[in-house]
Amino acid sequence: MRSHVQFLPDHLANWFNTLDTASAVAPVIRRLESGLDFKSCRKQQEAESSGMGGTLTWPNDPEKRLGMKLLLFRSAVTNRSADLISWFGFVFIPSPSGRNINNAARRFLDQVFWPMSRELLQEANKVPAADRVVHLDHNSSVYRQAIEALEKLEEALREANDYPDAEDKEQRIAEISATQRLLKSVRVRVAAVVTVIGSGLAYLASHFVGYAIDAASHGVIEKLTALLGAYF
């Protein structure tokens, strides 16, 4: 909140990295952002702005509104620039004190980021506890697809000769193996699976974008969600 605009992308990157690798929060983030197009939203905002003091509009649905705000700040990380945050501050929260980019960014953080973070906390607290037991039908297609997805992810990791950290790679493979063992039972506690592999999936999906590991991680997320009825 008090960051100089020059360092704002780094602080936002650290914030998102914390969210994206936390097993209790990462599924909520993915659900809120899913299916939303921030680029189209920004074009609409630019078209509706009138130089200074335009009307800031968001989707009517509360979850989509929260997801779009998350994507706005994530865009500042992706583009490694805080200009977007300053621009929104200049245009939609004008100040008679002038066009200081730090002040503009901080106004927007104060009026949008801070309330958004509180909304996100409330949304995360609404998610019911995953500490329940699910019976597994080992002959069902959804079960086989989940196991196949785990096998593909393990294979992608083993074949990744350029993985930057050998010990981390070994840990991720061990977590996949442990998840496979959990799913061999006729019933499984959802919280146990989430604890074992949830944060690992979030890490792999966010740190290897465009690689085979990325696609395989999202495949596991999709299939485990379908199998266990929980977000990963």
Image (cartoon, rainbow, N blue to C red):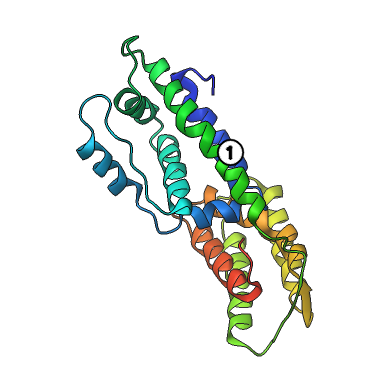
Percent coordinates x, y for residue 82 in the rendering:
40, 27
Judge by depth and name the residue closer to the eye, 16 or 59.
59
Q: What residue type is labelled 1?
A: Arg
Q: In this rendering, would 128 be left or right of 216?
A: right
Q: In this rendering, would 48 be left or right of 219?
A: left
Percent coordinates x, y for residue 66 in the rendering:
47, 46
Name the residue: 34% across, 29% down. Answer: 88
Judge by depth and name the residue closer to the eye, 212 or 166.
212
For the question of whether residue 25 can be seen, the reply is no
**For the residue labelled by badge 1, is the local secondary structure a helix, a strand or a loop?**
helix
Name the residue: 69% across, 49% down. Answer: 168
* Residue, far bottom: 139
Q: Is residue 31 above or below residue 53?
A: below
Percent coordinates x, y for residue 199 in the rendering:
66, 53
Name the residue: 58% across, 65% down. Answer: 221
Quarter-wise, where is residue 146 in the image?
bottom right
* Residue, far top: 97
Judge by depth and name the residue closer to the eye, 223 or 165.
223
Label 1 neighbourhood size at 10 Å, few (<14), some (14-19), many (20+)?
A: few
Name the residue: 25% across, 24% down. Answer: 52
The C terminus, quarter of image: bottom right
Q: Name the residue under label 1.
A: 118
Q: In this rendering, would 108 be left or right of 152?
A: left
Judge by depth and name the residue closer to the eye, 198 or 49.
49
Total residue callouts? 1
Quarter-wise, where is residue 35 in the image?
bottom left
Q: In this rendering, would 50 be left or right of 230?
A: left
For the question of whether residue 3 can be seen, the reply is yes
Q: In this view, does 95 lie above or below 169?
A: above
Q: In this view, does 49 lie above or below 60?
A: above
Percent coordinates x, y for residue 107 in the rendering:
43, 22
The N terminus, quarter of image: top right
